[in-house]
Structure formats: structure tokens, C-alpha cells
Amino acid sequence: MIYNNIWLLSLHLLVLVAVVVRVLERPHRAPASRIAWLVVVLALPVVGIIAYLMLGETHIGRRNQKAMLAKLGGEHFSEYFIDENADESIGLPSHYVHLFRVGRSISNFAPVTGNSVQLMRDSAATIESIVSDIDAACSEVNLLFYIWINDNSGARVADSVKRAAGRGVTCRVIVDGLGSRVLTRSRLWREMGDAGVHTAIALPLGNVLLRPLQGRVDLRNHRKIVVIDGQITYCGSQNLADKEFSPKAKYGPWVDAVVRMEGPIARQNQILFTADWHLCTNEVIDSPSEKPLSDATANVVAQVIASGPTLRHSAMEEVFISLMFSARHELTISTPYYVPNQPMQAALCAAAYRGVQTTLILPARNDSREVAGASRSYYAELLEAGVDIREFVGGLLHSKTLTLDGEISLIGSANMDRRSFDLNFENNILIYDPELAQNLRVRQQDYIDSSDRITLEQVEGWSLTRCLWNNSVAMLGPIL
């Protein structure tokens, strides 16, 4: 009995030492994250070790990593490379070239012109437009969504995809295994397959016990991609669900922002979709041939920026920080989740310190109490720097937008927290178009007009209990 106990203790210590060494030698980890994980592992030896094995590293499994990297290789995107001196020839001012070079260094897409862009009026208009475009599709429909619910909006899009498949259009649908688990277990999902729609589940949950062996269990495909006939694409924050979002209706309505674009930018989203399709199905699909727009006024410069655990570490974070440091007059951001690391917090404060009119718009009531608390732990420093913080009270502000100096816009699926930067597959589009930037700024002003302004006096008046909660949940950020 004594020998058995000694053997078990020795084994436990060996595993504990191995995990501690792994925490210390793991690349791309901030010192604060290492310290946090060491505290958890040493303070809770059994629970901490299990937690680290399941949640401590951002890997998706060797086979998936190899497949994704093969599909996202430089040669695959070679047709979208441009000479580094050619940026101005496509109508991109020289003082914004460096921003698009950051994006190109991440997913290898060059900025392309010849696009048109339209900011959707609201969630209902987005669903209406997507359904209309699918009903007019001639050759191919590709959809990828983190959340697809079989409510009114979700069913309408599903029905349009079934109709398209019925008339011979090639239709492919990818949904996330966690975010769309209700749909994938429903009759509507089976009906789409029976109608001839090719379906795939990204990062399926599978067996809870075996899933950690295939990769970190909470990595998700958070992208929202619509590509129709290789010519039309949508990008933004909206999932395929009613704005009331029935699973979390008490937070609704969810407020989103989406753009509809036509032109070469659709081909970039198409290639991103094919990479995800290949990862889910191991099937290689070709993109439809690119057709130039007949509209001579279609001169919007745009670039798809994709990020995820298989790409460069903290890639999307670099995009946000680069935009913040480039602001000279005005920087306006809306996001549902703001849990930054120190470089991002410093970049946002630096913008305000150098006289940039800097506004951060967040939801007053978040669907995650922990995220809301963590976000508010950063308020005091931001307010002291001069950042204007607004909390939106007209629902759950889910819109992920950034406008820069009235000319640059960033819109897509990425939030401003570590989950989006390191754990989720995300897709954004960086756009140079003063007209869109101004229209998007008007939309952001609507958010501001429906928000409460947060002052430093309010924050300093928060109770001790509230401050302890905010700062405590913020401490959990590094170990996610």
C-alpha cells in the first residue's frame, strides 16, 4: 500500500513537473499568461493540470494544422500578390499603404480595387439581401457562419439555399460545431442535405473525452462568409438568426453591421472559404472565374484579412494596433467584447494622448457577465487618457466596426479580446473608401446617440465589490 502511494505520488510529481516545463517553454505566450497558468497548476495540481491540457494551448491537431497551412500557403495566393510599389496605382494613398501591408503579411491577400460596397441598413435588410442574391445565383453559393439558428431568419436563408440547389446551383454550407449545434441536430439541416446542399461542420465537438487529443476543445470558427457566384460577398458581425436571438433574448435585440460587396474582393473571401471547406472535408474545390464589374465607378480598395490559430500569432491584434497608431484625427470603434492585452490598451490610450478624438462603444448589458466585468476594469486608464467611452443601451451591440480619419474602415467578425485574436478563426475586410467610412461613421454616431457616456467620476465611485469583481475576472484573461 505504501509503495503504491509512493508510486502514485511520484507519477503525479512527474506529470506536474512536465506541465510546468511545458508552460515555461511554450512559445508565443506573454509572461503574465505563464505566471497565471503556473499559479493555477501549482495551486490546483489535479484540476490545474487537466485545465491546462484542455485549454492551455492553441492547437487544432497535427492533421488539421497541416491541411490548413497547405491551403493557406503563399503559392495559393500568388495571383493576389502585387508589387510593393504598386499600391498607389490602385488608388491607395501612400500614407495608408503600410496598413494594407500588415494585412497582406498575415493572409497574403493584396489590396484590390474595382469593388463596390454597400452598408446594409439593419439585420432584417441583410437577411433580405442575402436571400435575394441567393435566389439570383447562377453557379455557386458558399456560406460559412458561426451561428445559424433555425428561426425565421435562419430558415429563410436555408430555404433559399435549398431552392438554389434545386435549380442546379452548387451550394456549400459550413457551420461551427458549437455555435450552430442546434441547427446541425435539427430537421432543417437534414433537409438541406436532402435538397442537394453540400454541408460541413467546422471543428465538431465529438467525444468530450477524446476531443482534447485532436486539439484544444474551445477553438471555434467564428467567421461569417457569404460568397455568391464568386462576385458578391458579405462581411460583418451578423449571424444567421433573428435580431431578437431567442437563445439569449433577454439581451436583444442584437445590433449588427454588415457590408455587401461586389468585385475582386469576393474572390478573396471565396479562397478563404475553400480553405475552411478543405479543412472540414479534405475536398479541394476550385474558385469560379473572376468577372470584372461593368460599373465604372466601382473603385473601392479592399483587402480580406483572415486570422486563426493556424496563422501568425496575434495577427488580428496587430491590425487593430496598427490602425490605432495610424489615427491622426478621429478613431471610432464599436465592439461587444473589449478585453485587450497591454499593447492594445496602450495603443488606444496613446491615440487619445496625442489628441485623436478616440471613442470606444460597448454594450451596456453584455451576454457575458465576466467579459463585461473584465472590460470595465480597463475603463479608468482609458478615461484618464481621454478616451470617450460609451455604453450602448438599445440592445446588445454586436457590431464590430472601426473607422479611421473618415477614410479607412475595418469590419468583420473579430472582437477585441484574446479569444478572437488567438483562439477563433476570424475574417475582416479592410477598406479604403471615404464614402463608406463616412456612412459607417454615421452608423457609429447612431450607436453613440443611443449610449450612456461613462465618466471617470462614475468609475471612481464604483463600490469595492464591483471593483474587485471587475479586476478579478480581468485576471483570468491570460489563462484563456
Image: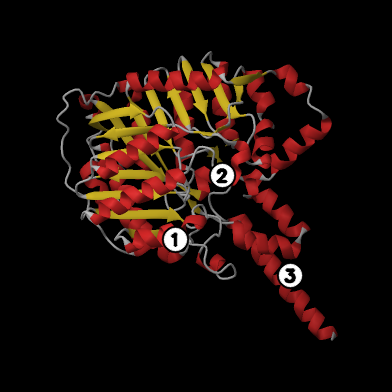
Picture quadrant of residue 64: bottom left
Residue 246: which numbered mark, if any? 2
Separation of marks 1 and 3 at Cα, in angstroms: 50 Å
Q: Is residue 182 visible?
A: yes
Which is closer to the viewer, label 1 or label 3? 1
Read off the residue under disc 3.
Answer: 13
Q: Is residue 61 left or right of residue 235?
A: right
Residue 144 % position (x, y): 38, 49
- Give the vertical position of 261 relative to 32 (above or below): above
Estimate the spatial distance between the alpha carbons at disc 1 and disc 2, rounded to whole Å.
18 Å
Q: In this rendering, is residue 431 above or below 307?
A: above
Mark 1 lies on residue: 187
Q: Amino acid at mark 2?
A: Ser
**What element does badge 1 sit on?**
helix
First in sequence: mark 1 vs mark 3: 3
Badge 3 marks a residue whose secondary structure is helix
Direction right: furthest residue: 2
For the residue carrying disc 1, how many other residues have a C-alpha within 10 Å: few (<14), some (14-19), or many (20+)? few
Amino acid residing under circle 1: Arg
Q: Sequence-wise, which precedes: disc 1 or disc 2?
A: 1
Disc on res. 313: none
**Residue 436: % across, % down:** 35, 22
